[in-house]
Image (spheres, rainbow, N blue to C red):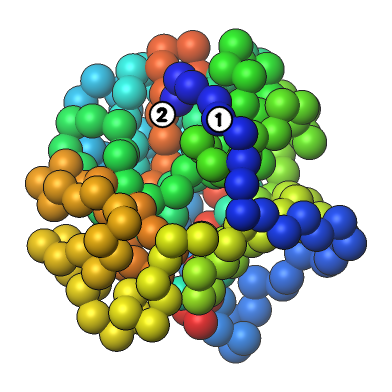
Amino acid sequence: MKKCVLFFAVVALLIPVSVMAQDPNDGWVKIFNGKDLNGWKANDTEGEFYVNDAGEIAGKGGRCHLFYMEELQEFELLIDVYINDKGNSGVYVLSPWIDNNWPTGGFEVQVNATHTDPVKTGSLYEIISIFESPVPADKWYTLHLTVKGNRLTVEIDGKVLYTYIDPTARFAVARGQGQGQGQNPNPNRPQNAQRGTFKYIGQKGHIALQQHDPGSLPRFKNIYIKKL
């Protein structure tokens, strides 16, 4: 994406933790089979997502976002991520579906080690800005996101970068009511159901992967969710 802003309402957690094992008996479910994009859907034709010969989701071309089509609310996501030198991408959570456009709702965790955009890997785009990437380009890393209550925790390779606390989410209302795209349980946030602008932790939404521009070649594998 294109602009950066200062962060707010964040609790920084510096103690490293181990990456959680993807044990299906512990509630983890694999949502990418390594063979095809069953369960996923691209929202644009400018770019392309495909499964490469290594069994990874790969992106190429112009703007495109690949949505996991089940809506989720409280969950953990584990995903291995790779971005090329000068490439830009992102992993969205709680994002409403949107056709032929950048997602305007939900939350994007930035994937960018060396792109000209100053907002680097691990940032929560337009909310929490990290200006030095914790991982280099051309290297796989594990991104672990936890969405629960009004909090979103971001970990990379077992280290917690921060927990973002949504200061405007009306958590009790968001959990109990107004979870569809035609309703907005938080009057402090703008809404436009057709363009998907809902943006508060507590809403339901999709996981989405970003193909940013022709110079970007992101790859993703080992994708697991655990509903909370």
Viewer-nearest residue: 203 or 100: 203
- Image coords of residue 68 (percent x, y): 34, 56
Horizontally, is 109 left or right of 131 in the view? Answer: left
Identify the residue shown where x is 41% and y is 13%.
214
Which one is in front in this view, the residue at disc 2 or the one at disc 1? 1
Q: Is residue 137 above or below residue 164?
A: above
- Quadrant position of residue 63: top left
- Quadrant position of residue 99: top left
Q: Residue flagged by tag 1: what amino acid is it? A: Val
- Image coords of residue 35 (percent x, y): 41, 51
Viewer-nearest residue: 118 or 42: 118
- Distance between mark 2 and mark 1 Cα atoms: 22 Å
Q: Residue flagged by tag 2: what amino acid is it? A: Gln
Q: What residue sits right under mark 1 in the picture? A: 5
Q: What residue sits right under mark 2 in the picture? A: 211
SS at badge 2: strand
Of labels 2 and 1, earlier in sequence is 1
In the picture as drawn, the residue positioned furthest to the bottom comes out as: 25
- Quadrant position of residue 38: bottom left
- Image coords of residue 141 (percent x, y): 72, 44
Q: Residues within 10 Å of mark 2 (few under 14, many from 20)?
A: many
Which quadrant, please, contains the N terminus? top left
Identify the residue shown where x is 50% and y is 36%.
126
Horizontally, is 116 left or right of 162 in the view? Answer: left
Identify the residue shown where x is 18% and y is 31%.
100
